[in-house]
């Protein structure tokens, strides 16, 4: 493993660890219903990022990699115009979260500030990855997603007055501002050209035709990981929601680790190899993707199983021990999801977008139907079974589709 990959894993690992530690101390010092509300805010923001971003980067990244960075400026300028328009269209719609009391009104300003900054920094991280600046992207990601966790964790431990969601969200805003400034410095040094060229409206329209279907498929997955929380609250109450949020936070942290160690390196190389029709290199990257995904997923799962009980002993709240079965189910869900990313990135690189879209939409339907059918007879397991069924379908469908198109 080369030094850049090790540094990248260390930075992403530090980000991941800081998030896990934050969840741990939030669970220790805040009541489960507050942990649950925090989870709803997180899920709503992350889902909303897709609404304002439209997953346009999926199209733009593949397109940008076809050109020299000296020509990227006018493409990126055009994309900025698109996002400004989307802000004006989506922000009023997102107010319905507060109007219908899904989220409390006292969070409304913080919510939109975080959403705005989270989207911008996310796009800049993706741009740095497209430029093969993985270490720079990981540094920005650390300040974006890790710094605020460290700051608020220290505050929560030593100052009782900071044990409130408002202060947690303010720390997140501070971290996002720092991350944005660092990302802009990195991009300034790269000196991307072409900013004075005219807007490419036709490029935006073409991109939207490709991005919107992909957005729908991505929203289907994100909707599963948002609706599940609301569904748990309806079926089992706010305290069990807090338990669910803690455990799914731990489980999904494995995906962050995989992004750092595998996916952020693999997919740009897969796309480039396919664009250049370099079959030998594409097959080499495919083997590395499979090998690294399986090895790191296995390692992460074993570590998670070893440390979960010591973590719960530290939190020292019986409700988490009483419902530890939720963690085991969610860990299984995440392993299936991560394994499905192998055929996902291979299909993405080869531009089999329709397969990805179809699989996600059907998976969403499976989740809703399964969970809804079981909610009355088995409320404790209905959401968990719905997740297992939907992500198992994605893994099987994408794998079979890739094999069908490459044999």
Image (cartoon, grey):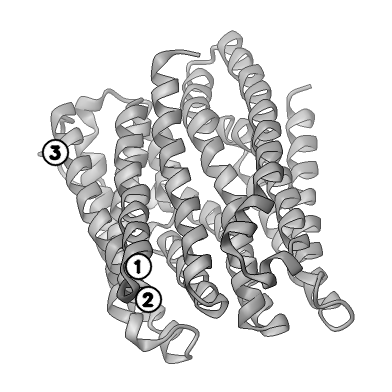
Residue wearing tag 3: 195
Residue at 43% x, 57% y is 54
Q: Residues within 10 Å of mark 3 (few under 14, many from 20)?
A: some
Q: Position of residue 152 (x, y in %)?
A: 33, 61
Q: State left or right for residue 9 relative to residue 389.
A: left
Q: Quick one: SS at disc 2? A: loop
Q: Quick one: SS at disc 1? A: helix
Are the residues at dot 3 and dot 1 in contact (C-beta closer than 8 Å)? no
The residue most toward the top is: 280
Q: Residues within 10 Å of mark 2 (few under 14, many from 20)?
A: some
Q: State left or right for residue 210 relative to residue 56.
A: right
Are the residues at dot 1 and dot 2 in contact (C-beta closer than 8 Å)? yes
Residue at 34% x, 80% y is 107
| Picture layout, residue 88 above or below residue 293 | below
44 and 246: which is toward the camera: 246
Residue wearing tag 1: 168
Mark 3 and mark 1: span between their CA atoms? 37 Å
Q: Position of residue 184 (x, y in %)?
A: 18, 42
209 and 297: which is toward the camera: 297
Residue wearing tag 2: 164
Q: Earlier in the sequence, mark 3 or mark 2?
A: 2
Quadrant into which the C terminus falls = top right
User: In this orientation, does residue 201 appear?
Assistant: no
The residue most toward the right is: 377
Q: Position of residue 244 (x, y in %)?
A: 64, 67
């Amino acid at each position: 493993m080369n030094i850049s990959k090790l540094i990248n894993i260390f930075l992403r690992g530090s980000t991941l660890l800081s998030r896990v530690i934050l969840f741990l101390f939030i669970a220790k010092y805040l009541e489960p219903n507050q942990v649950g509300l925090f989870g709803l805010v997180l899920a709503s923001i992350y889902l909303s990022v897709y609404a304002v971003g439209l997953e346009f980067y999926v199209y733009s990244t593949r397109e940008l990699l076809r050109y020299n960075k000296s020509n990227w400026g006018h493409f990126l300028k055009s994309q900025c115009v698109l996002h400004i328009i989307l802000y004006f269209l989506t922000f009023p719609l997102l107010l319905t979260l507060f109007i219908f009391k899904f989220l409390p009104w006292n969070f409304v300003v913080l919510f939109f500030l975080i959403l705005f900054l989270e989207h911008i920094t996310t796009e800049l991280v993706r741009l740095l990855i497209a430029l093969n600046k993985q270490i720079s992207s990981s540094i920005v990601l650390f300040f974006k997603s890790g710094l605020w966790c460290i700051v608020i964790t220290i505050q929560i431990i030593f100052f009782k007055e900071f044990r409130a969601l408002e202060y947690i969200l303010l720390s997140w805003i501070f971290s996002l501002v720092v991350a944005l400034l660092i990302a802009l410095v990195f991009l300034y040094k790269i000196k991307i050209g072409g900013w004075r060229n005219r807007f490419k409206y036709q490029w935006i329209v073409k991109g939207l035709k490709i991005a919107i279907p992909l957005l729908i498929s991505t929203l289907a997955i994100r909707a599963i990981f948002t609706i599940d929380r609301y569904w748990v609250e309806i079926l089992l109450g706010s305290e069990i929601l807090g338990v669910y949020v803690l455990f799914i936070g731990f489980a999904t942290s494995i995906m962050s680790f995989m992004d750092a160690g595998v996916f952020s390196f693999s997919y740009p190389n897969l796309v480039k190899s396919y664009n250049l029709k370099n079959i030998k290199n594409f097959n080499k990257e495919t083997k590395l993707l499979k090998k690294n995904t399986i090895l790191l997923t296995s390692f992460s799962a074993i570590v998670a199983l070893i440390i979960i009980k010591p973590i719960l002993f530290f939190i020292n709240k019986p409700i988490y021990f009483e419902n530890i079965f939720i963690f085991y189910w969610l860990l299984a869900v995440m392993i299936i999801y991560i394994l499905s990313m192998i055929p996902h990135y291979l299909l993405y690189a080869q531009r089999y977008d329709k397969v990805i879209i179809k699989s996600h939409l059907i998976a969403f339907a499976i989740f809703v139907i399964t969970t809804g059918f079981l909610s009355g007879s088995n409320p404790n397991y209905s959401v968990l079974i719905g997740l297992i069924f939907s992500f198992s379908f994605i893994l099987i469908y994408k794998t079979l589709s890739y094999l069908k198109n490459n044999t």
